[in-house]
Amino acid sequence: MRFDVITLFPDMVDAVMGHGVLGRAAEQGLVELVTWNPRDYATDRHRTVDDRPYGGGPGMVMKVEPVRAAIQAARAAGEPASVVYLTPEGQKLDGAGVAALADCGRIILLCGRYEGIDERLIELEVDQEISIGDYVVSGGELPAMVMMDAVARLLPGVLGHADSAAQDAFAEGLLDCPHYTRPEVVAGQGVPDVLLSGDHQAVARWRHREALGRTWRKRPDLLEQRGLSHEEQTLLEDYRREQDY
Ligand SMILES: CC(C)(C)c1cccc(C(=O)NCC2(NC(=O)c3cccc4nocc34)CCCCC2)c1
């Protein structure tokens, strides 16, 4: 999959492709990132990309023309694409939204800076608006990188065997079970006996029960969405009994 990112900070966005899962995926050619800087499309001597807001007030607004020229250069450089504007006004990104984006042939991501972009640019060029959450951030670049990471992990071949097993667990709609590794005792704390038992069925059952219990305790909303099988109801009752809930 190819991502084109319209950003005033291309180096920041390029960094996401240099490491870990996405780094390997880029090396394997499973994922491609091209960044486009509106400053390269500013026609004046000072390469201006922002200007004062009409109506007055603090801060600056990103100008239409340089950003639009960058978007159109990106459009011209490949297959038809969906233009996604990362913005607090956007539809909240969740698993379903990420899966839908993974099905898009090509995505052009638009990142805002300053107080935002001129509204006419949204009307002219944006297909969908997406938000990663309700908190103030300084620009759309980190949201764009979050989105690219989440989408890329769903692409065939991107995750190795081990990672995809982990992803399956996350995708199961439950929080993860607790994890432990050597040494067996650290700071006077040991490891749950079942994990040392070698009984793989008991370990799998314990992990499923812990995942259910933690989800019930910390994110009951996720359980609401997901629902529980009869067997899971039983496991959760075991958990609550065991934890004296
Ligand atoms: C009520 C709420 C959400 C706290 C809020 C209300 C008003 C403004 C902001 C805000 O952060 N403005 C700054 C700005 N943010 C974002 O781009 C952004 C923020 C959050 C999630 C995102 N997902 O994608 C992009 C996102 C970056 C600079 C250009 C203007 C947008 C926040």
Image (spheres, rainbow, N blue to C red):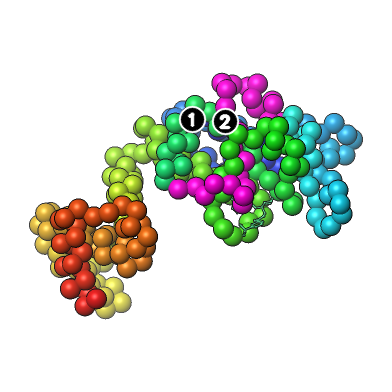
Question: Does residue 58 appear in the picture of this structure?
Answer: yes
Q: What numbered label is drawn on residue 76?
A: none
Q: Start and end of the magenta stretch?
A: 70-94
- For the image, the number of numbered tags is 2
Quadrant of the picture in which ligand 1 is shown: bottom right
Question: Does residue 206 appear in the picture of this structure?
Answer: no
* Residue nearest the observer in this picture, 184 or 6: 6
Q: Does the magenta segment cover residue 197? A: no
Q: Secondary structure at mark 2?
A: strand
Q: Secondary structure at mark 1?
A: loop
- Which quarter of the picture shows residue 188? bottom left
User: From the image, which quarter does the C terminus lie in?
Assistant: bottom left
Q: Residue 131: horizontal and vertical position, in percent?
A: 56, 49
Would you say the residues marked 2 and 1 are in contact, meaning their CB atoms lie under 8 Å apart?
A: yes
Task: Tell me what residue is drawn at x 81 percent, y 44 percent.
Answer: 50
* Residue nearest the observer in this picture, 240 or 142: 240
Q: Residue 80: horizontal and vertical position, in percent?
A: 57, 22
Q: Does the magenta segment cover residue 76? A: yes
* Residue nearest the observer in this picture, 203 or 63: 63
What kind of residue is marked 1?
Cys
* Residue nearest the observer in this picture, 136 or 222: 222
Q: Is residue 224 above or below residue 2?
A: below
Q: Which residue is mark 2?
A: 82
Q: Residue furthest right?
A: 45
Q: Which residue is mark 1?
A: 104
Q: Residue 220: horizontal and vertical position, in percent?
A: 34, 63
Task: Tell me what residue is drawn at x 71 percent, y 42 percent.
Answer: 8
Residue density around tag 1, few if under 14, some if 14–19, many if 20 or more, within 10 Å = few
Q: Residue 208: horizontal and vertical position, in percent?
A: 21, 57
For ligand 1, tell me if the residue under mark 2 lies within 8 Å. Answer: no
